Amino acid sequence: MTPAIALSLGLLGGTTLWDPKLDDYQWEVTPRAAYGAQARARLGRFGAGLRVWQNATTQRLGDPGTASPQVRTTSLELIGQGRVASVLGTRLLATASAGRIHLGYHPDHVTFDTPGGPIAVELSPVSTWSAGGGLALERALADRWLASVSVDRQMFALDTAHRNGNTIETRRETFGDWNARLGVEWLIGRH
């Protein structure tokens, strides 16, 4: 008998730990609460799906009196999973992901007071590609419910600018964040 495709919809909650290198660009890099959702399809040992994940931090700009805008990140990723082992009803999965990250600022305009008068700056949103990998544990809770815990690393690149003496240097730099997620999923098909 051919195994049936198992479908699931789930909610995710957890935390994101930003790359410490982002502190050089005045980002707050302490762990931040995050949340999301995912939809998956599984057949035998392998599965694939779509995941959305959102969190926020702040970026300090200018003097201490200048408001720090919130940086909200939303990632939309295709995920692939393969079962590595199964022990006492708990499955160990290797995961891989690829997608897009969108960074948006609130407020998206700031004004700096300078000796020459105020300067208004627009903080434009940024979107970039991402890729990642990690491990997950999942276990059935009841007939149609599944719980999971996962840890993964997500890599992405941003165009950066910083002062080096009297010049401004720009370059494309790679960053990575760590994500820890707890999930609860409702199983639509057989598992």
Image (tube, rainbow, N blue to C red):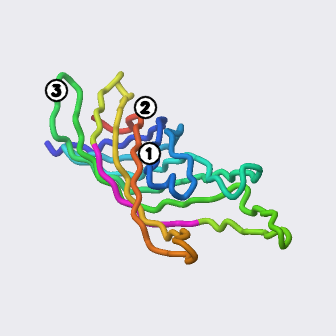
Q: Can you identify the residue that label 2 sits on?
A: 184
Badge 3 amino acid: Val
In the image, the segment drawn in magenta is 126-134
Q: Quadrant of the C terminus?
A: top left
Q: Position of residue 175 (x, y in %)?
A: 41, 58
Badge 1 amino acid: Gln
The quadrant in which residue 9 appears is top left
Check residue 174 for magenta coloring: no
State the residue at coordinates (86%, 70%). 117
Position of residue 119 in the picture relative to residue 60 (left or right): right
Q: Secondary structure beneath disc 2?
A: strand
Q: Position of residue 68 (x, y in %)?
A: 69, 51
Badge 2 amino acid: Val
Main secondary-structure element of the magenta-colored stretch: strand
Q: Can you identify the residue that label 1 sits on?
A: 38
Q: Can you identify the residue that label 3 sits on?
A: 87
Check residue 133 for magenta coloring: yes
Q: Quadrant of the N terminus?
A: top left
State the residue at coordinates (50%, 75%). 170
Alpha carbon distance from label 1 to label 3: 24 Å
Q: Position of residue 140 (x, y in %)?
A: 31, 26
Dot 1 or dot 3, earlier in sequence:
1
